[in-house]
Amino acid sequence: MKLVDYTTNGTEIIDGVQIVNIIKPLAASIKGRTIGDRVTIGDSNREIEIK
């Protein structure tokens, strides 16, 4: 996953890498985290592990 500061078109994948705008809930949730961290996405109950 790559965090970017420009507008993206929904789920954008370039060369196998998901591009996410830094203001989206997913990006805000993982910014500053490291591999192995578990984070909750935005205000949801959905949790992911950074790999």
Image (tube, rainbow, N blue to C red):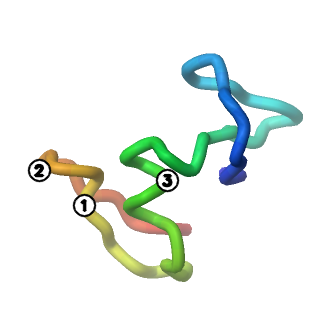
Task: In the rendered view, tell whether residue 3 sits above or below residue 19.
Answer: below
Q: Is residue 20 left or right of residue 16?
A: left
The numbered mark, 3 or 2, whose residue comes first in the sequence reads: 3
Q: Are marks 2 and 1 in contact (CB under 8 Å)?
A: yes
Q: Tell me the crowding category of disc 2: few under 14, some 14 to 19, or many 20 or more residues within 10 angstroms, Cα based.
A: few
Q: Nearer the viewer, residue 33 or 36?
A: 33
Q: Residue furthest top?
A: 9
Residue in the image at 45% along x and 42% along y: 24
Q: Tell me the crowding category of disc 1: few under 14, some 14 to 19, or many 20 or more residues within 10 angstroms, Cα based.
A: some
Total labels drawn: 3
User: Which residue type does callout 2 highlight?
Assistant: Asn
- For label 3, the residue is 27
Residue 41 location in percent, x, y? 29, 52
Residue 9 location in percent, x, y? 64, 17
Q: Mark number for residue 12? A: none
Residue in the image at 55% along x and 68% along y: 51
Q: Quadrant of residue 19?
A: top right
Q: Mark number for residue 40? A: 1
Q: Residue furthest right?
A: 15
Q: Is residue 12 left or right of residue 26?
A: right
The numbered mark, 1 or 3, whose residue comes first in the sequence reads: 3
Q: Marks 1 and 3, how far apart in space?
A: 11 Å
Q: Nearer the viewer, residue 44 or 16?
A: 44
Q: Secondary structure at mark 1?
A: strand
Q: Nearer the viewer, residue 17 or 19?
A: 19
Q: Secondary structure at mark 3?
A: helix
Residue in the image at 67% along x and 53% along y: 3
Which marked residue is nearer to the observer: mark 1 or mark 3?
3
Task: In the rendered view, tell whether residue 6 sits above or below residue 47.
Answer: above
User: Which residue type does callout 1 highlight?
Assistant: Thr
Residue 43 location in percent, x, y? 16, 49
